[in-house]
């Protein structure tokens, strides 16, 4: 239950101290994992150290019997990761909070690797390692942000090799702790500063090789998420080629070594000049080949008969047209003559077969009133009116007998 108090009825210090001691005492003993710093072994038989959370600016002051620390293998040093069974105690008389450890166990390499692998699976399921999240590196960055240890070989490798490739490259260098209890927070802070700098086009996180424990900060979840949240492309160059911390998976590009990182972020001026020369030569050869091809094509067109002697071709075509016209005229005349002859032949035949010619020789055709021809005497009788058709007209007749 919460303590009740008013300005008129305040609580005494002892009551508040006892309540704090009671509340804290309810937590009991808990197992806590963290990174050890500031180990202090005193002659009183006690050992004091700070247990830090590498992903946050939080720590606990822990004390334990010196024998617990003396028995550890490997020995407890700054940067060691341990699991501590501790109990918080609040001393009301002094108003101080202490953490008393009853068991200290180092986290072995196998356990560290298992935890890293489990974290890798979780982050991969979230899509932080997906290829579509990777951003391309700029061809020629205005400024390269470099996060590395102070005076480290990794810094020299990146800077010297980059300037050897491109002398005008500029660096914004952030020297931080790259191992130990403060490495994660310092690298995250440096990453945020470089990411906020608009002149920085690419960020390189570089560190030389080391043991699993030395490279452990670069598999920290907080650092991995900080790299994933960067808007600036990030190149990871941590450890040797065989070392693959989690930051390598989330970075936009992974470099096997710091020297390789320098090759990734800046182009080689000599190689680019040679490439430009090759491209220029290829372009010149292509242009010359095209010009030669077009010249040959023009020569072929110019040597064609139609272009070599256009008037002669027209003359030949005109002669061909005249010949065809003459042939057409003769064919038409022959056709007309043949048709006229046929017409004359048919006319003579029609004339020969016509009864008019017979009438002209003195013959006549007798016809009844209805126009029927009289072919026999039986066809008429006395009193019938007939007509005789002669060559030049008709003669009316009447049968008398």
Image (cartoon, rainbow, N blue to C red):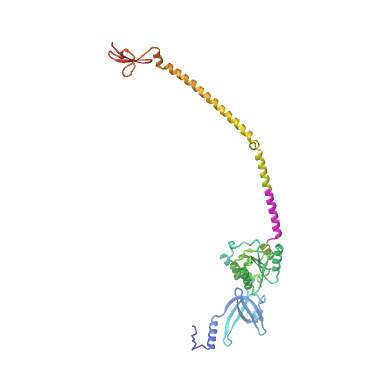
Left or right, 345 with respect to 320, comes to left
Q: Quadrant of residue 269?
A: bottom right
Q: Nearer the viewer, residue 291 or 244?
A: 291
Please state the horizontal and vertical placement of residue 23, each as a whole percent of the image. Answer: 53, 82
Left or right, 353 with respect to 209, comes to left
Please state the horizontal and vertical placement of residue 313, each as a whole percent of the image. Answer: 62, 34
Q: Is residue 152 magenta?
A: no
Q: Is residue 275 magenta?
A: yes
Please state the horizontal and vertical placement of residue 235, each as a whole percent of the image. Answer: 64, 65
User: For the view shown, which residue lies furthest in the top direction?
Assistant: 401
With respect to residue 52, does 125 lie above or below?
A: above
Q: Quadrant of residue 250?
A: bottom right
Magenta part of the chain: 267-287
Magenta stretch: helix, strand or loop mostly:
helix
Q: Is residue 273 visible?
A: yes
With respect to residue 376, does 228 lie above or below?
A: below
Q: Nearer the viewer, residue 159 or 98?
A: 159
Q: Nearer the viewer, residue 44 or 145?
A: 145
Total of numbered circles in the picture?
A: 0
Q: Residue at x 63, y 79 (%)?
A: 50
With respect to residue 223, does 282 lie above or below?
A: above
Left or right, 391 with respect to 243, comes to left
User: For the view shown, which residue lies furthest in the left direction?
Assistant: 383
Q: Nearer the viewer, residue 379 or 190?
A: 379
Q: Quadrant of residue 66?
A: bottom right
With respect to residue 363, does 256 lie above or below?
A: below
Please state the horizontal and vertical placement of residue 346, each as a whole percent of the image. Answer: 46, 20
Q: Quadrant of the C terminus?
A: top left
Q: Is residue 114 visible?
A: no
Q: Residue at x 58, y 31 (%)?
A: 321
């Amino acid at each position: 239950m919460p303590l009740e108090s008013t300005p008129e009825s305040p609580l005494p210090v002892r009551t508040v101290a006892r309540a704090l001691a009671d509340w804290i005492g309810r937590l009991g003993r808990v197992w806590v994992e963290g990174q050890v710093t500031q180990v202090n072994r005193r002659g009183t038989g006690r050992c004091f150290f700070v247990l830090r959370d590498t992903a946050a600016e939080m720590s606990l002051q822990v004390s334990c019997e010196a024998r617990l620390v003396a028995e550890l293998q490997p020995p407890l040093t700054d940067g060691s990761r341990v699991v501590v069974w501790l109990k918080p105690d609040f001393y009301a008389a002094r108003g101080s909070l202490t953490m008393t450890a009853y068991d200290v166990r180092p986290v072995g390499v196998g356990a560290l690797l298992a935890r890293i692998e489990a974290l890798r699976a979780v982050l991969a399921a979230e899509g932080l390692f997906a290829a579509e999240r990777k951003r391309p590196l700029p061809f020629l960055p205005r400024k390269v942000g470099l996060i590395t240890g102070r005076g480290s070989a990794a810094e020299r490798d990146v800077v010297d090799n980059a300037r050897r490739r491109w002398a005008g490259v500029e660096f914004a260098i952030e020297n931080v702790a790259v191992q130990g209890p403060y490495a994660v927070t310092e690298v995250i802070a440096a990453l945020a500063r470089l990411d906020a700098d608009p002149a920085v086009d690419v960020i390189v996180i570089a560190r030389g090789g080391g043991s699993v424990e030395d490279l452990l900060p670069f598999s920290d979840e907080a650092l991995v998420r900080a790299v994933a949240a960067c808007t600036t492309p990030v190149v990871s160059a941590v450890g040797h080629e065989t070392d693959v911390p989690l930051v390598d998976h989330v970075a936009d590009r992974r470099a096997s070594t710091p020297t390789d990182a320098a090759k990734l972020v800046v182009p080689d001026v000599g190689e680019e000049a040679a490439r430009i020369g090759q491209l220029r030569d290829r372009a010149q050869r292509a242009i010359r080949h095209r010009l030669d091809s077009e010249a040959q094509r023009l020569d072929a067109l110019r040597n064609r008969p139609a272009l070599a002697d256009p008037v002669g071709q027209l003359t030949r075509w005109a002669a061909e047209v005249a010949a065809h016209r003459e042939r057409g005229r003769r064919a038409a005349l022959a056709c007309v003559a043949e048709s006229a002859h046929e017409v004359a032949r048919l006319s003579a035949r029609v004339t020969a077969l016509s009864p008019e010619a017979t009438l002209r020789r003195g013959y006549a055709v007798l016809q009844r009133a209805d126009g029927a021809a009289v072919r026999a005497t039986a066809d008429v009788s006395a009193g019938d009116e007939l007509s005789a058709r002669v060559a030049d007209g008709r003669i009316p007749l009447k049968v008398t007998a």
